[in-house]
Image: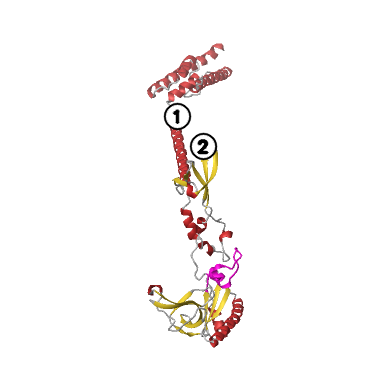
């Protein structure tokens, strides 16, 4: 066990433990103690008491002395000089063009250190500023960057409740505050309504957190299935934490009603699992996507089957279908070419006859040779060959050519003799 007293160096600041060193120190008096920053003057806010050694941060420093009137005057002078240093530092900051906001200035009791508190959005290079301040004040200079919560604690202000902010009145330490506390107390999650003067979540959300946790344990959650003493059951729609009542949606065969029930008169039949609705919606979406994917695959398979059937269709079926429709381009083309060749042969023969008749001489006829042309005097054979639609083989093709040449020679001799007889 150790005997300690509690000392505070700032209004609503943190309490530090010191050994009274045999002095009988009353609460509210000032003492001179040694700290990590040097010799300081603080106000006693906790009477002498004994606590466990585990609760003390070692080493436990001792009180140097109880503050005298001269010490009190010196403390007052330090506060006045700190205000003057504040204005000088602001002027220097403007001269150097630094992006920083000066909040407060403080002298140590022994006047060996001058501390400046400031805020900034990022890192600030204030080395040149320190040199200027050291040349002006001729003492050790310390610039300490603080957060927005510390800024509000030092400056103070009025909260949205109309009272001074908690951090500058009685809160010694900043307590962690989370959005879960606002949800537990069923508050609006609008940032402007649950944020303090510093822009962070209000510290007073922690004050009633334990009470709301105790009250919520006795109430069902929204979505739970409950039943009252009369045997009516339904789903919880809303919950009133302070009144300890719930509004239940009761569905019957005839109608649907909403009734208010007290928490001590209902029994919870089924708990609503957190996120069950979201999971159900997610599963429904996944099932729908699977059905759509399966439908797309089936459509692709059917299209592939139709394409394969078209590719595998026999050629004769297509030609037969065209024949049924009366469309035979190959036969028509062959017959037309045969008729055209026969007409050309007849016309050439007539021209030669005219020439031999005028000159009185006979020459063997010279007819245009064509692979597809038939003899002029044998139209029946040309018609038969064109209607057959089949090409002769190589050997048979040579014999047919020779036969046609002989036939042309004979026909040419006859045509040459006819003009002589006429003459």
Which region of the structure is painted magenta? 145-170
Q: Please tell me which residue lies in front, 421 or 267.
A: 267
The image position of residue 376, as x and y in percent, is: 50, 17
Q: How is the image coloured?
A: secondary structure
Query: How busy is the neighbourhood of tag 2: few (under 14 within 10 Å), some, or many (20 plus)?
Result: few
Locate the N terminus by quadrant.
bottom left
Assess disc 1: are there few (<14), some (14-19) or many (≥20) residues with their C-alpha within 10 Å of its C-alpha.
few
Residue 191 occupies quadrant:
bottom right
Single out the residue that lies furthest toward the bottom: 70
* Real-space Cα separation, disc 2 to disc 1, in angstroms: 62 Å
Q: Between tags 2 and 1, which lies in front? A: 2
Residue 158 picture location, percent across and down: 60, 67
- Residue 388 drawn at (x, y percent): 44, 18
Q: Is residue 183 visible?
A: yes
- Rendering quarter of residue 103: bottom right
User: The residue tagged with tag 2: helix, strand or loop?
Assistant: loop
Q: Nearer the viewer, residue 170 or 13?
A: 170
Residue appearing at x 60%, y 82% in the figure: 84
Coordinates of residue 224 in the picture (x, y in percent)? 47, 46
Q: Which residue position holds label 2? A: 252
Q: Are marks 2 and 1 in contact (CB under 8 Å)?
A: no
Q: Quadrant of the C terminus?
A: top right
Local SS, label 1:
helix
Is 150 included in the stretch rendered in magenta? yes
Q: Which residue is mark 1?
A: 310
Going 60% across and 80% down the picture, which residue do you hit? 83
């Amino acid at each position: 066990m150790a005997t300690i007293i509690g000392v505070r160096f700032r209004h609503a600041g943190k309490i530090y433990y010191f050994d009274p060193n045999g002095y009988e120190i009353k609460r509210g008096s000032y003492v001179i103690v040694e700290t990590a920053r040097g010799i300081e003057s603080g106000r006693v806010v906790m009477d002498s008491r004994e606590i466990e050694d585990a609760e003390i941060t070692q080493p436990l420093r001792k009180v140097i002395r109880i503050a005298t009137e001269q010490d009190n005057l010196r403390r007052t002078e330090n506060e006045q000089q700190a205000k003057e240093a504040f204005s000088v530092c602001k002027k220097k900051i403007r001269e150097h063009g630094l992006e920083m906001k000066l909040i407060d200035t403080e002298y140590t009791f022994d006047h060996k250190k001058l501390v400046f508190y400031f805020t900034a959005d990022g890192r600030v290079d204030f080395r040149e500023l320190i040199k200027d301040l050291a040349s002006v004040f001729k003492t050790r200079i310390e610039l300490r960057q603080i957060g927005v919560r510390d800024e509000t604690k030092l400056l103070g202000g009025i909260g949205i409740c109309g009272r001074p902010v908690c951090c500058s009145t009685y809160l010694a330490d900043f307590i962690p505050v989370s959005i879960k506390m606002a949800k537990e107390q069923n508050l609006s999650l609008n940032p402007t309504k649950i944020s303090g003067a510093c822009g962070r979540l209000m510290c007073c959300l922690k004050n009633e957190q334990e009470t709301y946790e105790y009250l919520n344990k006795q109430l069902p959650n929204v979505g739970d299935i409950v039943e009252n003493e009369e045997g009516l059951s339904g789903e919880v729609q809303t919950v009133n934490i302070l009144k300890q009542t719930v509004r239940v949606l009761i569905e019957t065969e005839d109608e649907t009603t909403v009734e208010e029930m007290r928490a001590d008169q209902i029994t919870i039949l089924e708990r609503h699992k957190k996120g069950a609705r979201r999971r159900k919606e997610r599963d429904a979406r996944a099932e729908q996507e699977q059905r759509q994917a399966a439908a797309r695959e089936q459509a692709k398979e059917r299209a592939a089957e139709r394409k394969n059937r078209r590719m595998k269709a026999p050629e004769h079926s297509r030609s037969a279908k065209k024949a049924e429709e009366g469309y035979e381009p190959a036969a028509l083309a062959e017959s037309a070419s045969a008729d055209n060749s026969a007409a050309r042969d007849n016309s050439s023969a007539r021209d030669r006859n005219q020439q031999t008749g005028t000159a009185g001489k006979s020459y063997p006829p010279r007819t245009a040779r064509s692979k597809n042309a038939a003899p002029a005097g044998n139209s029946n054979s040309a018609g038969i060959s064109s209607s057959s639609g089949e090409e002769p083989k190589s050997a048979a093709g040579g014999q047919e050519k020779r036969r046609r040449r002989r036939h042309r020679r004979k026909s040419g001799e006859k045509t040459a003799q006819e003009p002589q007889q006429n003459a």
